[in-house]
Image: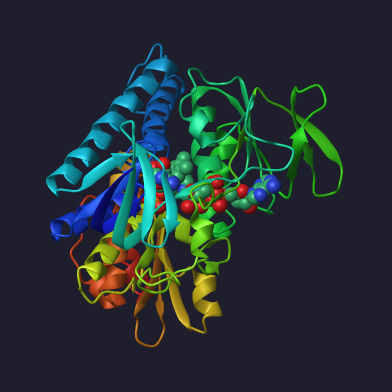
């Protein structure tokens, strides 16, 4: 067996691992990255990017279908069809471009990439079978970036008609009837896609309402839209397993009774768990943080020079957090003084309408003991939203009542995902309401609603 030594060994080529490796390479550190699947990990191959491609295509199709019925500005659409197989192919070309791009960036940073499964021997070495030969790699620093996998439910093991997001993102046609278990990010993003493609969608959620991590005011417009799309939402309901004849899903209602939901596919989206098994991690005996690898504010694990980043370290399991951790750990290894001290890790649910949150929600701020000012500005009073014939939703800002420090900003509405950067910038810069209100926001844009919400919190909104 060949043996190689390196300064930095990264296991996993998803957003956490590939960013850590690129940055380490940029800093001149000898770096090896091992990836058993495709570079880009979950996010590029079967997560963020494929789902957003589907969301775009399904929305375009649905829009065309809607125009056949309502024709406010004189557009005439006589027929609309969507070839799902072609949509999948289009998505694959985007994924291929991005994963090839990651390979190119790693090459540019002089990172050595090995394709194969890393098997840990201890906290400083692993073996990998790559290109037909088995190699032992020793490293000064080990970076664990092995990501996450979907949670399976008892009685609904993946296989056959029970699918995870991975299979949902490569179906050759839209199923006639889809049962979605879990009204979180994946269930609602992909449930909406299927509804727009014409599937009969039933969503089964254990909690009393959809997207339970966020407040009802913010998620209300999404619930209304699902209703208009014809999606049946069962809340306080538990999926129990496939029904006897295999025709669908058995669901336990809040009153204890059971019902059958007919389904050709059952998409289980009840969360993801750290990928911890099958590569010798247990040999390291690392301290855990719940079901995830335990880390401190520098992403250091309980073993010296063993670092963990991304989904394997827990919530929020988001690509931008993974990337920020990856960049930071590479810099720490290179000797920089860094710690993960972000005020804001924005979160976006790409539903219809989209939801974006940054910082604290009102009830979180109150629970933390803050006396807060909260103000909303509706898109129904925003000129740009009117000209786009999509006026639903609002921007909401909350700030400390005493010194007006912005504690959180949220929005629900069309295209609000693009607000995430402005929201986070305001929070990271420690903006006061006066800073946001005093910033000229270009007209006509949806972004004016951010300024108006801040003006509203100061008691003098101009356009409402
Ligand atoms: P991963 O991307 O999971 O990468 C881990 C990599 O490690 C994998 O490629 C795996 O093959 C490799 N690996 C594991 N073990 C080994 C081993 N022993 N040897 C070699 N290689 C190994 N996040 C967002 O921020 N925005 C979104 O819009 C979004 N949409 C999503 C949609 C879906 C359907 C899903 C499932 C997730 C979505 N996410 C989104 C979450 C996002 O994909 C993850 O947060 C992100 O991919 C985490 O990056 P990571 O590098 O930690 O892990
Ligand atoms: P999630 O945590 O967002 O939602 C899971 C939902 O399933 C919750 O509402 C939960 O109450 C419900 N649930 C749990 N057990 C249940 C049961 N037995 N029956 C019915 N409902 C049940 O998880 P997800 O949608 O699987 O997504 C996984 C992770 O992937 C997310 O946490 C997120 O980090 C990431 N993701 C992010 C995005 C994005 O950023 N836009 C998109 C997709 C996925």
For the C terminus, which image quadrant?
bottom left
Residue lying at the far bottom of the rendered structure: 402
Residue lying at the far top of the rendered structure: 78
On screen, residue 305 above or below 245: below
Residue that appears at 20% across and 60% down: 441
How many numbered marks does the figure carry? Answer: 0
Residue 383, x across and y down, in percent: 29, 48
Residue that appears at 22% across and 39% down: 103
Residue 228, x across and y down, in percent: 56, 35
Front position in the image: 373 or 213: 213
On screen, residue 343 above or below 165: below
For the N terminus, which image quadrant?
top left
Taking the image as drawn, is residue 210 in sight? no
Taking the image as drawn, is residue 20 in sight? yes
Residue lying at the far front of the rendered structure: 1
Front position in the image: 380 or 427: 427
Residue 201, x across and y down, in percent: 61, 30
Residue that appears at 48% across and 63% down: 284
Residue that appears at 24% across and 56% down: 6
């Amino acid at each position: 067996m060949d043996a190689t030594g390196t300064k930095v060994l990264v296991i996993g080529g998803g957003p956490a691992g590939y960013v850590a490796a690129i940055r380490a390479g940029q800093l001149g550190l000898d770096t090896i990255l091992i990836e058993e699947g495709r570079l880009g990990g979950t996010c590029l191959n079967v997560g963020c990017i494929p789902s957003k491609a589907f969301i775009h295509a399904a929305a375009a199709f649905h829009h065309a279908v809607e125009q056949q019925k309502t024709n406010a500005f004189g557009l005439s659409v006589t027929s609309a069809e969507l070839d799902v197989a072609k949509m999948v192919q289009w998505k694959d070309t985007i994924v291929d471009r991005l994963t090839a791009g990651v390979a190119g960036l790693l090459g540019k940073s002089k990172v050595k990439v090995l394709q194969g499964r890393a098997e840990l021997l201890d906290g400083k070495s692993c073996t990998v079978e790559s290109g037909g030969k088995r190699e032992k790699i020793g490293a000064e620093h080990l970076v664990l970036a092995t990501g996450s996998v979907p949670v399976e439910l008892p009685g609904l093991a993946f296989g056959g008609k029970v699918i995870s997001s991975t299979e949902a993102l490569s179906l050759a046609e839209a199923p006639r009837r889809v049962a979605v278990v879990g009204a979180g990010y994946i269930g609602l993003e992909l449930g909406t896609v299927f509804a727009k493609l014409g599937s009969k969608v039933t969503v089964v959620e254990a909690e009393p309402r959809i997207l339970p991590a966020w407040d009802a005011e913010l998620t209300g417009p999404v619930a209304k839209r699902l209703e208009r799309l014809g999606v049946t939402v069962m809340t306080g309901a538990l999926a129990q397993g496939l029904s006897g004849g295999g025709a669908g899903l058995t669901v336990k209602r809040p009153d204890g009774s059971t019902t059958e939901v007919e389904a050709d596919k059952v998409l289980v989206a009840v969360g993801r768990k750290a990928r911890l098994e099958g590569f010798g991690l247990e040999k390291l005996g690392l301290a855990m943080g719940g079901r995830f690898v335990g880390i401190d504010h520098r992403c250091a694990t309980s073993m010296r020079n063993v670092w963990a980043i991304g989904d394997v370290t827990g919530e929020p399991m988001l690509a931008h957090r993974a990337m920020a951790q990856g960049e930071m750990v590479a810099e720490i290894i290179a000797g920089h003084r860094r710690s993960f001290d972000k005020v804001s890790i924005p979160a976006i649910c790409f539903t219809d309408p989209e939801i974006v949150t940054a910082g604290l929600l009102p009830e979180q701020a109150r629970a933390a003991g803050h006396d807060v000012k909260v103000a909303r500005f509706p898109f129904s009073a925003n000129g740009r939203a009117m000209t786009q014939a999509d006026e639903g939703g609002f921007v909401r800002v909350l700030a400390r009542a005493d010194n007006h420090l912005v504690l959180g900003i949220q929005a629900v509405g069309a295209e609000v995902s693009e607000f995430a950067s402005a929201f986070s910038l305001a929070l990271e810069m420690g903006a006061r309401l006066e800073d946001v209100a005093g910033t000229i926001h270009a007209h006509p844009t949806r972004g004016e609603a951010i300024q108006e919400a801040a003006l509203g919190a100061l008691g003098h909104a101009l356009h409402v």
